[in-house]
Each structure stands twice: as C-alpha cells, then as structure tokens.
Amino acid sequence: MLMTTHTVDRYQPYRPRLQRQILWHATTSQRSPWRSTTCERSRMSEVDRHRVGSDRVKESHRIGKGTPLVTPSTFSIPETKRDQVLMGIRNIAGIIYTTVGVHPCSCKQFTKTSTSSSIFPAQLKALALAAKESGHCVAFGEIGLDYDRLELCPKDIQLEYFAKQLDVAVEVGLPLFLHSRAAHQDFIRLLKERDHGLQKKGVVHSFTGTKEEMLELVEMGWDIGVNGCSLKTEDNCSVVKEIPLERLQLETDGPWCEMRASHEGTKFLGDYKEEKEVKWVKKEKWVEGAAIKGRNEPCMIGKVAWAVAGIKGIGVEVVAEAAWRNSAKMFGLSEMVEGQEL
Ligand SMILES: [Zn+2]
C-alpha cells in the first residue's frame, strides 16, 4: 500500500502492517440495498447486480487490503432482502463486517405507518442482537443527526429516532457508529443523557465539526473518524491536526467523501501517489481486480492516512498504526496488530 518511488524502500518494512491497519468504512445507498454486500459499489447499474457476491467482496478486500465495515441503513433494505444482505456479509465473516442501525436521513420511513413506528425499536433490537451474536456485526449505527439535510428528514423526526435508537443501543451493547452534521448541541445532549449505558462508546465518523466540538467528544471518550470530508478546508485540517492519535480512526466513506484536488488536505499529501497496482476502469468495463473510475473506492484509504500524517507532521506508518489499533480495539476485529494484545 502507499507505494511511491521514494517511499517504497522507506516503508517496505511497514508494508505488511499497512495492508491491514486501517478501517474502511463504506456506506450504502438508500436506493440500492444490494450495495451493502459489496462495500465499494456506488450507483449500481443493472449490469453490476449479477456480480454481487462474496467473491466480489473478497476481491475488493484484496485490492484495498483492509477491513471493510459496511454501514447499511438497515431499515432502508426491504424486509424481504434484509436477511439476504446480512447473510451475504455473514458468509464472509472475518473479511467484512457490518453495522445495524438507521441513518438520520432515513428516519422518515418510520413515520409512514403507525405500525412501523411502534414495532421498530423491538425489530431493530432483535435484528442487532442476532447480528451481534453471529459475529459479523461489530457496531450499532450509523445513527445520529444531520441538520444539513433536513429535506431528507425533518429535525423533530431525526431527534425522536436518534433518541429511540440510542435507547436500543444501550440494550444491545455494541460500540456506536455515529453521524453528526451541524447538530452538535442536540447530538451531545442525547449522548450525555445515556452516557452511563454506552460503555463501549464508538466513533463519530466523517467529522467536520469545530476543534471545541472534537475535544468535547474526545473528553467524553468518543473516537473521531476522518475521511475526505474532514480534510476539505483549512479549518477542517486544523481540527484534524489536534485529534489525539489514541482517538483517531480513518475511513473512506466510499463511494462518497473522496478527497478532491481542491481540498486543503491534498496540500499535505507530500510524495503520495495513487496506488499503482490498482487498475481503474469505467463501471461498464469492470473486471475482477479493477476499481471503478470516478468514485471513492476503499483502496483510497491510503490517501487519507497520508494527508493526516502530513497535517500532523508525523510518519504515515504512525498514523496508520494508531488508526488501525483504535478501530480493531473498538470493534473487536479478529485481526491482531503484529500479534500484540490490543
Ligand atoms: Zn455518515
């Protein structure tokens, strides 16, 4: 991973470790539940659909060399397909992991019928407990608040269902995978109200808040997840610089949140070069072993690591080591760091 002509020798000793040091986070489309089984699949065409399956996931694992954590918005998956999707992930346990929970932008679905609203907490709890028991579900989420996208789900509904899901999370006992956008006060208030019940804490992913907000979360014991969105502006980068290494996690959030050339974070990439061994093709021309042009693939995780290292002024191996250790420890992933106890 992260090979360049200058760094291949310098980082060669770290190569085996870098290959598995960073948690991928890939999310799923509300429109395409199938994508939750493939982790890096974005706007899926009909042509793509038949390729979904464990071989494809294993291949993406091989290309990206990390541990994918897929965060499907569970109840956006039609009930008839939910088991199938979760089973797809279960069948490749040890390579890919999932979460169970409902994204704030998807919570409006619970208000569509009074039945769905009343049975949802019990349904979600049962699903999460079963998935936890099977070992392929390592976090509860992605849940939270998103006031930047109220057009997808109004604030009052987001608040109601974030609170309800946190109550379920307390009973389920998994670490949390959290989303917070322009909602810090409400977000932290709801977390604080249940602080005693959320012992395993979790990660606040795709962090774009202020330094004060980040420090408040860190102080309470939450990890901070960084992706391309967290590296967009000068302010973003100055916040990333201050995230303590012991609270840092890295993610792609593929297929979204890529680090674009216009992002401030790219100024800190140093001599990073795109991974040469990955073949990029148009999605219509996808073949086994290739990544798809124009979308944030999990194998781009190295770019995030490199930018964070540049911002912090430390070695990329230090960042990767810390981020992987934090992810593996929090989510109880089966891989060990150099055989050491986490
Ligand atoms: Zn999110």
Image (cartoon, rainbow, N blue to C red):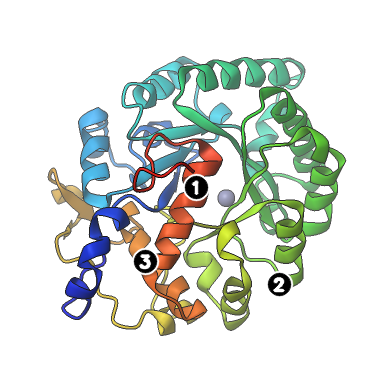
Number of numbered labels in the structure image? 3
Q: Reply above or below: 11 against 169.
A: below
Which residue is rendered at x = 78% and y = 39% of the image? 157
Pointer 3 residue: 317
Query: Residue shown at 47%/81% (left/top)?
Result: 313
Q: Where is residue 305 in the image (x, y as percent from the top left)?
A: 41, 66
Q: Which amino acid does label 2 sit on?
A: Lys
Discs 3/2, front:
3
SS of the residue at dot 2?
A: helix
110 lies left or right of 269: right
Q: Residue 66 carries which label?
A: none
Q: Nearer the viewer, residue 299 or 67?
A: 67
Kindly identify the amino acid type of the residue bearing the numbered disc 3.
Glu
- In which quadrant is the N terminus drawn? bottom left
Q: Which residue is the site of mark 2?
A: 211
Q: What element carries label 1?
A: helix
Q: Is residue 65 above or below residue 266?
A: above
Residue ID for mark 1: 327
Label 1 near label 2: C-beta < 8 Å?
A: no
Position of residue 312 measured from the top left corner of the image (x, y, whole percent): 51, 77
Kind of residue at disc 1: Ser
Where is residue 117, by image quadrant? top right
Label 2 or label 1, whichever comes before in sequence order: 2
Give the mark toward the camera: 1 or 3: 3
Q: How far apart are marks 3 and 2 (CA)?
A: 24 Å
Q: Nearer the viewer, residue 127 or 321?
A: 321
Image x and y of residue 212, in percent = 76, 70
